[in-house]
């Protein structure tokens, strides 16, 4: 997407502060966030620039951020894709414009605050769901967009911490019914391959990952597939239906994608742990609008709860 598509910030006629938000990808999760941001922009009399990049790539985010900074936005929020790779650049940005991280953090960036959940604790909540629906243990697989981002690291870690026991906390092993399957034990749960399957936030790849996993573990009793990004539970469900395994595989989700919620109501997905993207958008704009007026009282301290 070319920079020409980025709206200019120099609307001197309005005299309003301009608050810019760039997400980590395009997804219905961010549509909810944008709705909250628009409401906060109206309530706080600021203009909003909101961009969902077409790819979950720091290289795609960077020119958007740089353009907005050069155009003089009054505040900027970023869902950080690669904290290790982006922190240095974001630290430069933070010296020029008030910066908030949202959904994905970069602690060393000089940001004013982070708006989002404690992703480790959110992962632990998913782990508790797994134990509830698979109380006797079983074979599990984790699916997520990336393990580079802060939430991509923390959520799987939280799930596995919740499932682990002192005797089996990432203990390497082979599957008891399928010795060709390598993995790691976390308590009574065997994690196939010992790590999450990533899809780079490409939904077609997410479906392919789920189908491939089902082909490898089909016929094993007590299977649980765990999707940790908004689009993962629906893509897992699509793969399960394609394999005609509905009812034979437990699906545990994250976030409140409409298809996930419909599938929970239909009994096809066991449950999900949700964030509050609408309030993420609202709170982020509220914070940055206040900062533009010299008011730091709206900053978030700590993390926001899951539901």
Image (cartoon, rainbow, N blue to C red):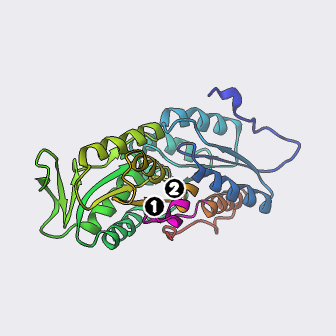
Q: Quadrant of the N terminus?
A: top right
User: Residue beneath label 2, please?
Assistant: 103
Quarter of image, res 73: top right
Q: Nearer the viewer, residue 42 or 180?
A: 180
Quarter of image, res 69: top right
- Between disc 1 and disc 2, the foreground one is 1
> Residue 81, image x and y in percent?
46, 44
> Residue 185, image x and y in percent?
17, 59
Q: Is 275 displayed left or right of 41 in the figure?
A: left
Residue found at x 47% / y 40%:
203
Q: In terms of sequence position, does the residue under pointer 1 or pointer 2 come before the other?
A: 2
Q: Is 48 displayed left or right of 304 in the figure?
A: right
Farthest front residue in view: 244
Residue found at x 79% / y 58%:
42
- Image vertical order of residue 195 relative to residue 9, above or below: below
- Image vertical order of residue 159 relative to residue 2, above or below: below
Q: Is 283 displayed left or right of 43 in the figure?
A: left
Q: Residues within 10 Å of mark 2 (few under 14, many from 20)?
A: many
Q: Nearer the viewer, residue 191 or 287?
A: 191
> Residue 23, image x and y in percent?
57, 46
Residue 16 included in the magenta stretch of the image: no
Please state the extent of the stretch shown in magenta in the rendering: 262-277
> Residue 234, image x and y in percent?
48, 51
Residue found at x 78% / y 54%:
46
- Image vertical order of residue 227 relative to residue 7, above or below: below
Asked whether disc 1 touches disc 2, contact meaning CB atoms under 8 Å apart, the reply is no
């Amino acid at each position: 997407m070319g920079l020409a598509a980025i709206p200019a910030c120099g609307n001197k006629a309005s005299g309003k502060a301009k608050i810019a938000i760039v997400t980590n990808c395009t997804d219905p999760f961010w549509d909810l966030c944008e709705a909250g941001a628009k409401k906060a922009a109206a309530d706080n009399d600021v203009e909003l620039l909101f961009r969902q990049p077409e790819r979950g790539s720091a290289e795609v985010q960077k020119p958007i951020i740089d353009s907005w900074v050069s155009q003089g936005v009054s505040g900027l929020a970023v869902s950080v894709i690669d904290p290790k790779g982006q922190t240095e650049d974001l630290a430069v940005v933070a010296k020029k414009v008030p910066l908030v991280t949202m959904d994905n953090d970069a602690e060393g960036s000089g940001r004013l605050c982070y708006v989002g959940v404690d992703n480790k604790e959110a992962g632990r909540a998913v782990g508790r769901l797994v134990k509830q629906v698979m109380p006797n243990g079983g074979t599990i697989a984790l699916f997520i967009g990336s393990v580079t981002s802060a939430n991509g690291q923390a959520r799987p870690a939280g799930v596995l911490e919740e499932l682990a026991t002192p005797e089996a906390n990432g203990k390497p092993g082979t599957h008891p019914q399928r010795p060709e399957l390598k993995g790691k034990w976390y308590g009574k749960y065997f994690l196939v391959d010992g790590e999450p399957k990533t899809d780079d936030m490409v939904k077609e790849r997410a479906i392919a990952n789920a189908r491939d996993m089902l082909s490898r573990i089909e016929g094993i009793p007590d299977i649980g597939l765990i999707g940790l990004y908004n689009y993962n539970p629906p893509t897992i469900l699509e793969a399960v239906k394609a394999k005609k395994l509905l009812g034979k595989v437990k699906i545990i989700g994250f976030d409140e994608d409409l298809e996930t919620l419909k599938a929970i109501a239909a009994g096809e997905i066991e449950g999900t742990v949700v964030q509050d993207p609408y309030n993420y958008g609202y709170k982020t704009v509220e914070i940055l609008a206040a900062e533009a007026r010299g008011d730091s009282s709206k900053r978030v301290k700590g993390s926001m709860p899951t539901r």
